[in-house]
Amino acid sequence: MGKVVTLGEIMLRFSTECGTRIAQTETFTAHYGGGEANVAVSLSNYGHQVAFASKVPDNALGEAVKKHLNRYGVDTSYLLKGGPRLGSYYLEAGIGERAASVIYDRAGSSFAVMETAEWDLTQMFAGCDIFHISGITPALSEAWKKLTLELIKTAKQAGCLISFDVNYRGKLWSQKEAGETIRAILPFVDYCSAGKLDAQHFLEVPAYNGTSEDEETTYYYQEMQKKYPNISVFYSTKRKVHSASANDLIGTLWAEGNYYESQCHLIDPIVDRVGGGDAFAGGVLHGLLNKEDYQKVIDFATAASALKHTVHGDCNQFSQQEVESFLAMGSGKIIR
């Protein structure tokens, strides 16, 4: 099993019940989560040694974040305390043809207002196999644009493989800002979660002009690989949205000049879609850490993501054995 460090902001999510709008609700369900924290939970569930680095306020909410992560076995040695507040957001659950919607309340959070890397980076990256971070972090401030690149370079110099999830959030920054920053980061990346839209909008890849869906996916991976030959693995999902409550999900992966695709998972009904991409990323990194066959990597990761859609909260709550049993038995069967 490997040692991994993930770094990013963790927030408090307030969710409405399905069928209730934010403006009418009298109660919210609270969950803690964030892209990099969710990946850390997945990898810890699969038996890896994982530390999550962030900063939270020195109050009961900050302590609740620590307890949430510790519950899943995530190392919180690099969870700093201090600063003004914990970021939060409000999720209006979608159903049927009505999509979910999000209202952020994260400005001025303890993590977002950081100006320098306050961790002992030599210690944090010592013996680390993978450093995972996402495009959400540099979107938080001008300081974090610079800090993200500095952290990646430091981790790289320490011998870590760099895992980067583009994870674009249009409410945080423009496509132009994102593209400039992402293109500066990718020359240092080893594993990258990026798909068709990322290639078009941020990596300046010309649109595919053919008619084959399979060839289209391969085309974008090949073009991204040409631009960034340092990246050994690209991966992403193909999702067909029948409604907010029912999606088809397929995982795809590109490595060593070959394309790999999982079976299609019909997820109906979706209990909670938030964190599905993080569960997928965690599954991919798990397989890569274990040096699994690439087909097995993408099959496991997609199954893990499909399972995440069946539980409330941001993080994957399933063990390696449970994901593998789900794959072996097929969806919907009783496990006796």
Image (spheres, rainbow, N blue to C red):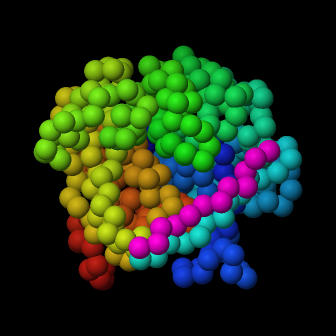
| Residue 15 place in picture, x, y as percent | 63, 71
Compared to residue 303, the image places residue 256 above or below, namely above
Residue that lies at the very extreme toward the top in this rendered image: 157
Compared to residue 252, the image places residue 102 above or below, namely below
Viewer-proximal residue among 74 and 65: 65
Is residue 307 shown to the viewer in this render? yes
Instruction: Answer with left or right where residue 49 lies relative to residue 325.
Output: right
Compared to residue 241, the image places residue 163 above or below, namely above
Instruction: Answer with left or right where residue 89 lies relative to residue 251.
Output: right
| Residue 32 place in picture, x, y as percent | 65, 61
Compared to residue 152, the image places residue 9 above or below, namely below
Q: Quadrant of residue 233?
A: top left
Is residue 4 shown to the viewer in this render? no
Name the residue located 28 percent from the left edge and 21 percent from the top edge: 226
- Magenta segment includes 3: no
- Magenta segment includes 99: yes
Q: How many marks?
A: 0
Indicate the quadrant containing the C terminus: top left, top right, bottom left or bottom right: bottom left
| Residue 159 place in picture, x, y as percent | 50, 21
Instruction: Answer with left or right where residue 207 lies relative to residue 318.
Output: left
Name the residue located 62 percent from the left edge and 77 percent from the top edge: 21
Name the residue located 50 percent from the left edge and 58 percent from the top edge: 275
Q: Which residues are magenta?
A: 97-108
Indicate the quadrant containing the N terminus: top left, top right, bottom left or bottom right: top left
| Residue 243 place in picture, x, y as percent | 37, 71
Name the residue located 60 percent from the left edge and 81 percent from the top edge: 20
